[in-house]
Image (cartoon, helix red, strand yellow):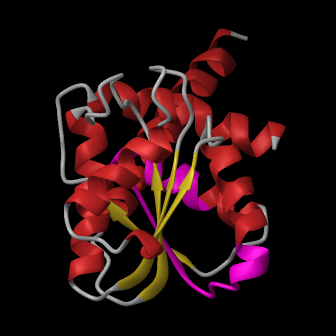
Amino acid sequence: MYRFLRIGALAGIAWFFLHCLWVVYDGLHRFTGKADVAIVLGNTVFANDSLALWTQGRVDAALNLYRNGQVKKIFVSGGMATSMYPEGDGMRDYLVCNGVDSNDVIADNYGDNSFLTAKNFITFNRQQHFSSAVVVTSFFHITRSKYILRKLGYINVASEPSNYYTIKDWFYLTRDFVAFYKYVVVY
């Protein structure tokens, strides 16, 4: 019995490390093509409309794609969980202040999590008919974000990592391991 538990524990640890290696590889891969839209997953926007550094890193990555002509539109999505200022509006305002045409930014303030962002984008896309998208978020979050979009039926999705990194990302990588399999089971 002890032998089986040990083998099971070692298999679980190996699975965790292999999954994390894949997420890091997938999440740090830069997008070199063109797509119709960038989907930016939100995070903290402070009450004064300023973006947290990690949120700004995501938005700046999408801004670079836009300026390079790699995307035509930017769909920014977030909720209001961390402040009383809607994340989608804060990210939109930042993009517009940095030269993006306001007609090229779509703000979704009901994307409280990755699933809702994907669901809201797919609902929005029924009228827009974007055929390709680039998910822009922190590297540890990319694999799960692409997974849920594909699971909900949007197949042609690539990714671009945030321009901001911190030591805490390794903790979030571990947390996202659990979240990924929650998405596999729940959604």
| Relative to 24, residue 84 above or below | above
Q: Is residue 108 magenta?
A: no
Q: Please state the horizontal and vertical placement of residue 67, each as a whole percent of the image.
A: 22, 79
Residue 172, by quadrant, is top left
Q: Quadrant of the C terminus?
A: top right
Q: Please state the horizontal and vertical placement of residue 132, each as a whole percent of the image.
A: 56, 84
Q: Is residue 132 magenta?
A: yes
Most extreme residue toward the top is 2
Residue 33: tell me if it is visible.
yes
Q: Residue at x 71, y 34 (%)?
A: 182
What's drawn in magenta, residue-wise? 125-146
Q: Please state the horizontal and vertical placement of residue 64, each as a whole percent of the image.
A: 21, 71
In the rendered view, does 182 fall on the left or right side of 143? Answer: right
Q: Residue at x 27, y 72 (%)?
A: 30
In the rendered view, does 3 fall on the left or right side of 41? Answer: right
Q: Name the foreground residue: 138 vs 61.
A: 61
| Relative to 180, residue 97 above or below | below
Q: Residue at x 29, y 71 (%)?
A: 100
In the rendered view, does 185 fall on the left or right side of 17? Answer: right
Q: Name the foreground residue: 177 vs 83.
A: 83
Q: Name the foreground residue: 53 vs 49.
A: 49
In the rendered view, does 179 fall on the left or right side of 33? Answer: right
Residue 21: tell me if it is visible.
no
| Total numbered labels placed on residues in the image | 0
Q: Residue at x 25, y 32 (%)?
A: 52
Q: Quadrant of the N terminus?
A: top right
| Relative to 120, residue 183 above or below | above
Residue 153, by quadrant, is bottom right
Q: Please state the horizontal and vertical placement of residue 95, each as a whole percent of the image.
A: 29, 59
